Amino acid sequence: MDDLKQQAEELGIKVDGRWSDERLQSAIDKELGAPVIPKALTVRSLVPNPMRTLGLEGYGTVTLTARQTADERVMKRVDRAISLGILERA
């Protein structure tokens, strides 16, 4: 951290003592004109949801898209809420 702090001060950046290494590096990159990756944009958000293959009795296998996989997860949560009495079946 001391190296980053020193480098930032040499570039004329006013460093707050509470800054983390990540914050220091971001300020240095910004000063040098390097592209800054937003914190919310992580590696996980860059990777699409994997497709899922299901074996259905009598129908062989079916591959679900990422959207269908997400819908399946929601439906499992709804079914669980119904079984616990949190929701009522319509």
Image (cartoon, rainbow, N blue to C red):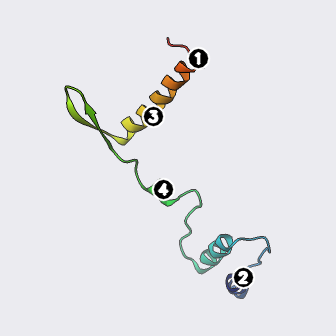
Q: Above or below — where is 9 with respect to 88?
A: below
Q: Position of residue 17 (x, y in %)?
A: 80, 75
Kind of residue indicated by mark 2:
Lys
Mark 2–mark 4 distance (CA, rounded to whole Å) = 29 Å
Q: Position of residue 21 (x, y in %)?
A: 67, 74
Kind of residue indicated by mark 3:
Arg
Q: Nearer the viewer, residue 84 or 14?
A: 84
**In this rendering, the label closer to the viewer, 3 or 2:** 3
Q: Residues within 10 Å of mark 2 (few under 14, many from 20)?
A: many
Element type at marker 4? helix
Which residue is located at x 76 percent, y 77 percent? Answer: 15
Mark 1–mark 3 distance (CA, rounded to whole Å) = 19 Å
Mark sitting earlier along the chain (3/2):
2
Q: Which residue is mark 2?
A: 5
Answer whether labels 3 and 2 touch (C-beta < 8 Å): no
Kind of residue indicated by mark 1:
Gly
Mark 3–mark 2 distance (CA, rounded to whole Å) = 45 Å
Mark 1–mark 2 distance (CA, rounded to whole Å) = 56 Å
Answer whether labels 4 and 1 touch (C-beta < 8 Å): no
Q: Nearer the viewer, residue 17 or 55?
A: 55
**In this rendering, the label closer to the viewer, 1 or 2:** 1
Mark sitting earlier along the chain (3/4):
4
Mark 4–mark 1 distance (CA, rounded to whole Å) = 34 Å
Q: Which residue is mark 1?
A: 85
Question: What label does residue 44 carry, if any?
Answer: 4
Q: Which residue is mark 3?
A: 73
**In this rendering, the label closer to the viewer, 3 or 4:** 3
